[in-house]
Image (cartoon, rainbow, N blue to C red):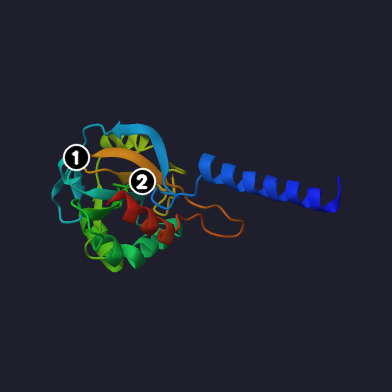
Amino acid sequence: MNKLQAGIVAAIALGLGIFVALTISPPSSDEPQYLSLYPQPRALPEFELVDNHQQAFTTSQLKGHWSLVFVGYTFCPDICPTTLAELSSIYPKLVALPSEHPVQVVFLSVDPQRDTPERLNEYVNFFEPEFIGVSGEHKYLFPLVKAMGMMYSMSESTDNPNYLVDHSSSVVLVNPQAQVIGRFKAKFEPGKIALSDSQLILADMALITE
């Protein structure tokens, strides 16, 4: 095979490669890229929580909204305040998305012993007055968090006033029918706090809420 024939063959191979890449795995800009979707929407168990305004919080408060839910507690030293700060930074753009169902951010505290409605109110207001802080009894919290695909556990005795709580660090997405559809997984990098990327959340939410 001479150089001309080799060049033609190479060009054809390159063209076929591009064609296959575009037809079999076409780049898509209209599908969420960061959200990890569950195989099917998950119904949430019945629960009775109390929000930071001392009002009842049930599935009714999730219906009709796209809800970004983060599980944590106000005494959390790192992941919780950093994640809420990140969500606060994109919140103006989230609520400005043209959608039939507005976006809301819910901070779900799994430390009801210390996180009273008053403390939750002070805490979420520090980040964004429109954020919703909720908590309640563990008999409601545990199955709710589990249904969301998340977890939490007390890492030590609550007799210690400074006890820590282990919890998932992803941000869960609940649809307007109060069903969990997926989560924005936290990124784990050596030496850094595991966080969900707020800009990627915003990019995906712009597509999801259309």
The amino acid pointed to by label 1 is Thr
Mark 1 lies on a secondary structure that is helix
Which residue carries the number 1 mark?
Answer: 59
Circle 2 residues within 10 Å: few <14, some 14–19, many ≥20: many
Is residue 76 in sight in this rendering? no
Mark 1 to mark 2 CA distance (whole Å): 15 Å
Residue type, label 2: Val
* Foreground pick, 139 / 182: 182
**Percent from the top left, x then y, of residue 79?**
45, 57
Compared to residue 19, the image places residue 132 above or below, namely below
Q: Which quadrant is home to the N terminus?
A: top right
Residue at the far left: name it. Answer: 55
Which x, y percent locates residue 195? 47, 56
Position of residue 114 measured from the top left corner of the image (x, y, whole percent):
30, 52
Label 2 sits on residue:
172
169 and 36: which one is in front? 36
In the picture, measured across the screen, residue 6 lies left or right of residue 61, that is: right
- The kind of secondary structure element at disc 2 is strand
52 sits left or right of 6 in the view? left
Locate residue 71, reporting x and y percent: 36, 48
Residue at 32 percent across and 34 percent down: it is: 41
Say which quarter of the image contains residue 178: top left
- Which of the marked residues, 1 or 2, is nearer the chain's N terminus? 1
Within 10 Å of disc 1 (Cα), the crowding (few <14, some 14-19, many 20+) is some
